[in-house]
Image (tube, grey):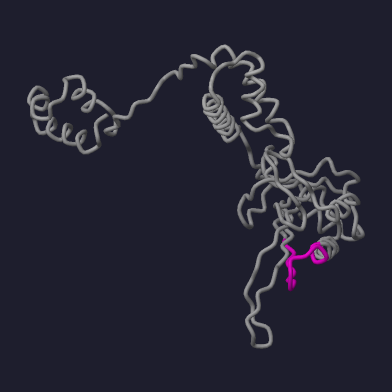
Amino acid sequence: MLVLETVLRIRREHAAGKAIKAIMRDLHLSRKVVRKAIRSPEADMSYRREVQPLPKLGPFQARLNVLLEEDEARPRREKLRITRIHDLLLREGFDGSYDAVRRYAARWRQARRRDVMDAPAFIPLLFQPGEAYQFDWSHEDVEIAGLPVRVKVAHVRLCASRTMFVRAYPRETQEMLFDAHARAFAFFGGVPTRGIYDNMKTAVTSVFTGKERVFNRRFLVMANPLHGRTDGVFAGSRLGEGSGREPGADGTRPVLPATPALCQHGGAERLAGG
């Protein structure tokens, strides 16, 4: 394979009017190589194999795909090592190497991740009044009694009207999370039908692949009075601070269907505005 400097020299000399035959003679290259260097886009001379031959693994490729699919669906603690998958194939008559199985599994998982990343997603930009609110934390540097102090600020925003409730706390703990919810719902005069959350530690204990989440028990205790069940809770990666918008169907943030709780429905007109 030619190095980039040689490819650029061939292209430069050809652009200056030098004949291909002269370039071949000076650089001791074949006509095929010189023509490829001239015609290749962006001076790319790297070799890319169109089809990966699988002389040993080919007859067992379908079985290996099934094993990888089953393993992908297992919980994290129950997933099989590639050595175990290789051993299962050996018991079924496969006589290839472990490295062949390992390389195939790596390509399979890479393609799987690429398919997930290319999956269509959408972000609704319109909300009905009282449909959803967003909760998130930020940290702010303030001065109290002449001393610099960093405080945690709870932000609760109605997605339709963009009405915001903000309250500062000394720490980001669950007690303060619950207090911020109670005060925000009292301020709004009711509870919107859905809440949108980030993967904050006060709500999510563990984050797994896709939508798999382990939620904090106390957070679920708070969420249960809001909507009466926990199967509507979703979580995922961050969408950006202060977006105030609901994520798409891939569940990039927790979405909690909610009914009135933690406060009285005394200010329906405030919710109707948001």
| Left or right, 192 with reference to 142 | right
Camera-nearest residue between 194 and 5 = 5
Q: Position of residue 24 (x, y in %)?
A: 12, 25
In the displayed structure, 195 sits above or below 14; it is below
In the displayed structure, 135 sits above or below 126; it is below
Residue 12 location, quadrant: top left
In the displayed structure, 51 sits above or below 128; it is above
Q: Position of residue 269 (x, y in %)?
A: 84, 57
Quadrant holding the N terminus: top left
For image coordinates 85% across by 48% down, the residue present is: 258
Total labels: the figure holds: 0
For image coordinates 12% across by 33% down, the residue present is: 13
Highlighted magenta segment, given as a residue range: 164-177
| Left or right, 142 with reference to 54 | right
Residue 25 location, quadrant: top left
* Magenta region includes residue 56: no
In the displayed structure, 223 sits above or below 172; it is above
Residue 67 location, quadrant: top right
Camera-nearest residue between 182 and 222 = 222
Q: Position of residue 126 (x, y in %)?
A: 68, 45
| Left or right, 186 with reference to 242 | right
* Magenta region includes residue 173: yes
For image coordinates 69% across by 37% down, the residue present is: 249
Q: Position of residue 17 (x, y in %)?
A: 8, 30
| Left or right, 231 with reference to 20 | right
Quadrant holding the C terminus: bottom right
